[in-house]
Amino acid sequence: MPAMDINEIMRHLPHRYPFLFVDRVLECEPGQHIKAIKNVSINEAFFQGHFPGYPVMPGVLIVEALAQVSAILAYFTRGDTHERGELLFFAGIDKARFKRPVFPGDQLLLESTELNVVRSVYKFSARASVAGELVAEAELMAAVRGVGP
């Protein structure tokens, strides 16, 4: 599948500024894997407090970016979008490891591979890297749940 720009990403994810952490999808193979990027800018609101004088992207937000890319893969695999009354909720994280800090100016390469799906619960192996160097990795779980009336 060809790349997704920000407009296509927002069709698949309910997240919006300031909590959308995927700028472009480079490739997405339904049921298999996805590669995307997050451009890390000093203008991100979290850098005001994390940490003044030494801005570092919080690890939990790197994991959130990985969860968002995994959700895009799941929605795309389902042939679905968040607009159809079901959302993909973060359900678990295992084996999370952080290897080095992420700074303003870095470009995160976000990759996720679908490991399995059981009754609308997805499991992914995800990793983030900067310039070919691993910065974080984890196994993530997400569950599809209906929302609204």
Image (cartoon, rainbow, N blue to C red):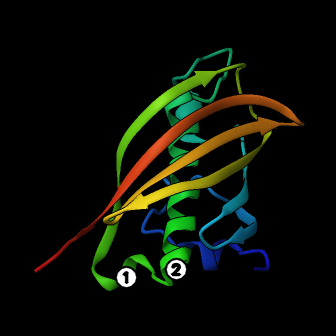
Say which residue label 2 marks.
11
Residue 36, percent from left and from top:
72, 58
| Residue 68 visible in the shown view | yes
| Residue 20 visible in the shown view | no
Q: Residue at x 45, y 82 (%)?
A: 80
Q: CA distance from mark 2 to mark 1?
A: 8 Å
Relative to residue 118, is residue 15 drawn left or right?
Answer: right
Which amino acid does the dot numbered 1 rest on? Answer: Glu
Which quadrant would the N terminus be assigned to in this image?
bottom right
Which amino acid does the dot numbered 2 rest on? Answer: Arg
Q: Are marks 2 and 1 in contact (CB under 8 Å)?
A: yes
Mark 2 element type: helix
Residue 78, percent from left and from top:
47, 78
Residue 45, percent from left and from top:
54, 39
Mark 1 element type: helix
The residue closer to the viewer here, 132 or 21, is: 132
Q: Residue at x 68, y 15 (%)?
A: 54
- Give the label on residue 83, or none: 1
